[in-house]
Amino acid sequence: MPSTPQDSVFDSDSQDRLDRIIATHAGREGPLLPILHDVQAEWGMIPEEAQPIIAKALGLTRAEVYGVVSFYHDFRDHPAGPHVLRLCRAEACISMGGDELADQICRALGIGWHETTPDGRLTLEPVFCLGLCACAPSAELDGKLIGRADAARISRMVAEVRA
Amino acid sequence: MRIFVPIDAAARALGADEVASALEAALQDQGVGARIIRNGTRGMIWLEPLVEVERDGIRHGFGPVTPEDVPALVAALAAGGLDHPRALGPVEDLPWMRGQTRLTFARVGVTDPVSMADYQAHGGLAGLRAAIAAGPEGIIGQVMESGLRGRGGAGFPTAIKWKTVAGADGPQKYIICNADEGDSGSFADRMLMEGDPLCLIEGMAIAAIATGATQGYVYIRSEYPDAIRAMTEAIGAARRHGMLGEAMLGSRFGYDMEVRVGAGAYVCGEETSLLNSLEGKRGVVRAKPPLPALQGFLGRPTVVNNVLSLAAVPWIMEHGGAAYGALGIGRSKGTIPIQIAGNVRHGGLYEAAFGMSLGQIVMEIGGGTASGRPVKAVQVGGPLGAYIPPAHFDVPFGYEELAGKDGLLGHAGITVFDDTADALKLARFAMEFCAVESCGKCTPCRIGSIRAVETLDRIAAGDGDAIPILTDLCNTMKWGSLCALGGFAPFPVMSLLTHFPDEFTGPANARKEAAE
Ligand SMILES: Cc1cc2nc3c(=O)[nH]c(=O)nc-3n(C[C@H](O)[C@H](O)[C@H](O)COP(=O)(O)O)c2cc1C
Ligand code: SF4
Ligand code: FES
């Protein structure tokens, strides 16, 4: 298989790691999503090379596995930056100025949704509700939740993690 | 002395972890002996982080607390006092707490969420014991009498679903808890799973006895890592205690369960899409029949219930279906955990019997907008629910009552908007959301929503002739969609068009000026 730079995360000892992940879940009812979550946790994406191996192990076709990977917003076909900022775009956050906040952040970072800063350090993702709707607008930086978010605070936190 | 600092995600988003660390340091510095317990949230999110100090069995509140407030608070405690600028008095005496009928959320905010000992000290397991004594038919009888209806949106009677599964044959039956909670404005499932996960486990165990199911799954959205952690820990604690397993509490009933994590698809909250997702497939909606009750997970008889439906059951089994059914109005029986969100002064969770007026909830409990400006409208029931303006605030909070206003109770989330909200933008958002989240199975939803976004853009550019096209598209989606994603997305749009027609007509720049 021709190797593209994106796929290179899957190297020679990756096969072993993947086999171990598959073995952990093989006996479960409906093992595919748990496997894909673990694969993404391991490689930061679902490497293309992993898909036929998973398919074979579960008795599925490659198309079936690809179909599942592409259906869900969580599964990535290329890695995110080492830092991920997620901004909530849903209604409760809109009611508290979420749209304006998103505009400010996009301008400050110079990127749009699903994009990574030119230095490759930070990826911006939308999210539709974090369940923090009573302290909107909300955001999440590298898993840390932020309630009543404002642009100054987010920029400060982003600067800290990028430093 | 015990000091409580919530571990709920909303409290953490407002700095509860930093407050807990500051407390630990200050207690050590000042040589004060106290144990810090991380509890769930009481639901008064505007007071978070809400620290509680227990004295003579009474819990005194302080909030919202910042790390900077902590040294003075600890100094006051060390001196034997409770004086502090953030002091709120006994938490149970606050109007927000006194006004509620907290049945499902009785323990949330009170206990250590994953402590089996705390759980039992506060009434936990009484429902499961009663259920074991009552047996399958006895349980279904009590749930029937309670009038409990599904809290996930459709309002289907829970007992009837359970009876169908109980009567179905299969090598294995399942209890599946729908914890996908994708609706904006909703967070009750999250709060319960983080604050009292054992209650949900108990409810699922009772459902298992009622139906003959032996395996369960909680399908939690990936956006809720804290809930995933709390549920996983609680399941472990329940197993060690013998609450789950081959002989639950030493009875003849066996049942076990595990957590499964979604992957960021709103439509997977729809029960058949959820089943496909659990099976490891694309989350495409299945046609009904067959009913999931008869052919659900892996084609076997399956109960799919929302978190709140299942978590209401331990109380019902402990106190009897009649006591639950005595609360509420019309066909909306019992209590409903109302979530008040968005541009609101007092946002949070408020559990009360069905029947308060929407106006009472928004203006009295919620205290109006956070901005202090007039309320323009509230969206009830998540992204598929209608926007309701203050002129209709007399509507009682109940399934049929809201449906009578073309509204939706849904998961009982209410999102408040002030008068700066842009009706046209909100309408566009509703359709954009539908387009992004559509499972793709039916054309009116998949394509119709994209056309609707384009049509709304034409309207925004000043093309009034596009309004009838939008109305037509909405009708096609309403009648031609397989599930409520495509079928209900027109409701928020049409409600905005009905209540704020001026914002959809007239030149685009006049509209812009009005908004400024
Ligand atoms: C697009 C869509 C999303 C839904 N999302 C949820 C959800 O997040 N949680 C939920 O409990 N029910 C959701 N439902 C309703 C479920 O299909 C189902 O009615 C419910 O889980 C049944 O449980 P209940 O009877 O306890 O309410 C959704 C329905 C649709 C059409
Ligand atoms: S209405 Fe939309 S989400 Fe529902 S089944 Fe049809 S395409 Fe899928
Ligand atoms: S709408 Fe943003 S957190 Fe719920």
Image (cartoon, coloured by chain):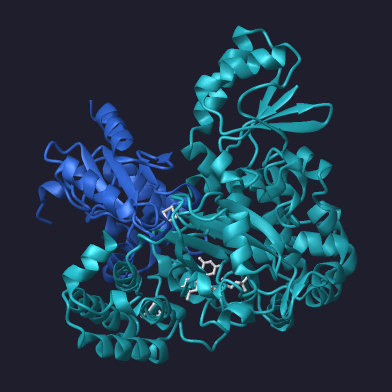
Q: Position of residue A79 (x, y in %)?
A: 23, 47
Find residue B202 and report its image quarter: bottom right
**Apparent side of residue A67 relative to residue B306 in the rendered image (left or right):** left
- Residue in view at x 71 percent, y 19 percent: B34
- Residue in view at x 54 percent, y 89 percent: B289
Nearest the viewer among A132 and B268 is: A132
**Apparent side of residue A87 relative to residue A28 in the rendered image (left or right):** left
Nearest the viewer among B514 and B434 is: B514
The vertical placement of B79 against B236, above or below, is above
- Residue in view at x 47 percent, y 50 percent: B370
Q: Position of residue A130 (x, y in %)?
A: 44, 52
User: Quick one: quadrant of the N terminus of chain B?
Assistant: top right
- Chain identity for the colour cyan used in the image: B
Residue A79 seen in the current view: no
Nearest the viewer among B140 and A148 is: A148
**How many labels sit on residues?**
0
Q: Position of residue B275 (x, y in %)?
A: 50, 71
Residue B188 seen in the current view: yes
**Apparent side of residue B5 relative to residue A29 in the rendered image (left or right):** right
The vertical placement of B92 against B363, above or below, is above
Q: Position of residue B309 (x, y in %)?
A: 67, 66
- Chain identity for the colour blue used in the image: A
Residue at the limit of the structure toward the right, as seen here = B133
> Which of the four quarters of the rendered structure image does ligand 2 lie in?
bottom left
The vertical placement of A12 against B442, above or below, is above
Find residue B24 and report its image quarter: top right
**Apparent side of residue B59 relative to residue B513 in the rendered image (left or right):** right
Find residue B55 and report its image quarter: top right
The vertical placement of B154 against A108, above or below, is below
- Residue in view at x 57 percent, y 82 percent: B403
